[in-house]
Image (cartoon, helix red, strand yellow):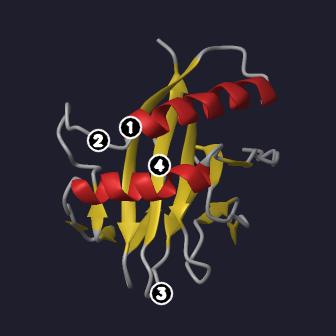
């Protein structure tokens, strides 16, 4: 077997209007109630990952159009020759010591929108070809990367809450 190492694309962009919508999105998330996840691979103070189909994600009317704009720009910039769609989305809130262990996503591209990111909060960690690294991101950024890249959120050490909204991009049917 021969491994041909080619760099993989990590795309970082700013969400248009982040400063204008941040408070509204956080309020919408809070209005949905608290849904903690405590498992061996993750501990999240609040997430809507396990909510049933049809669950009213109050923030989707604001965020989905902006995520679709991101998807179209991504398709143009990366010159992807087929249609893309947002296949799933969810939020995660990390309080002190919360984490999400190493994992991948079953999609073409995974995305993390850093909605509320304290300055002292951990950024997403990646492992590619045995190398562990982070990408320099700040609040309001969307980080896009291949869904097959192994990543995690290490234990949150800040006393302030970190909130991300993640979404997966797949090929259109």
Q: Secondary structure at mark 3?
A: loop
Q: Quadrant of residue 155?
A: bottom left
Image coordinates of residue 18 in percent, x first then y, are: 59, 51
Image coordinates of residue 117 in percent, x first then y, are: 55, 70
N-terminal of the two: label 3 or label 1? 1
Q: Secondary structure at mark 4?
A: strand
| Circle 3 residue | 157
Image coordinates of residue 4 in percent, x first then y, are: 81, 44
Marks 1 and 4: which is nearer the front?
1
Q: Secondary structure at mark 1?
A: helix
N-terminal of the two: label 1 or label 4? 1
| Circle 4 residue | 166
Above or below for 34 versus 159: above
* Label 1, label 4: how far apart the Cα atoms are: 12 Å
Q: Mark 3 and mark 1 in contact? Answer it, CB < 8 Å.
A: no
Q: Residues within 10 Å of mark 2 (few under 14, many from 20)?
A: some
| Circle 2 residue | 57
N-terminal of the two: label 4 or label 2? 2
Above or below for 65 versus 99: above
Residue drawn at x 47%, y 11% is 173
- Which is nearer the eye, 2 or 35? 35
N-terminal of the two: label 3 or label 2? 2
Marks 3 and 2: which is nearer the front?
2
Q: Determine which of the numbered discs, if any, sits on residue 60 in the image.
A: 1
* Label 4, label 3: how far apart the Cα atoms are: 21 Å
Residue drawn at x 69%, y 64% is 137
Please say whether residue 102 is visible from this viewpoint. Answer: yes
* Label 4, label 2: how far apart the Cα atoms are: 13 Å
Q: Mark 1 and mark 4 in contact? Answer it, CB < 8 Å.
A: no
Q: Residues within 10 Å of mark 3 (few under 14, many from 20)?
A: some
N-terminal of the two: label 4 or label 3? 3
């Amino acid at each position: 077997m021969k491994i041909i190492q080619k760099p993989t694309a990590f795309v970082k962009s700013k969400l248009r209007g982040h400063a204008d919508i941040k408070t509204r999105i956080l309020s919408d998330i809070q209005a949905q109630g608290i849904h903690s996840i405590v498992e061996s691979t993750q501990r999240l103070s609040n997430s809507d990952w396990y909510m049933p189909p049809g669950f009213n994600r109050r923030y989707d009317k604001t965020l989905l159009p902006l995520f679709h704009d991101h998807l179209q720009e991504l398709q143009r910039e990366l010159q992807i020759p087929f249609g893309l769609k947002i296949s799933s989305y969810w939020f995660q809130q990390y309080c002190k010591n919360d984490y999400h262990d190493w994992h991948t996503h079953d999609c073409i591209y995974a995305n993390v929108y850093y909605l509320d990111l304290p300055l002292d909060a951990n950024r997403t960690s990646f492992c590619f070809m045995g190398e562990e690294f982070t990408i320099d991101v700040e609040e309001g950024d969307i980080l896009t990367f291949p869904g097959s890249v192994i990543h995690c959120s290490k234990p949150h050490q800040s006393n302030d809450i970190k909130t991300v909204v993640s979404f997966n991009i797949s090929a259109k049917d």
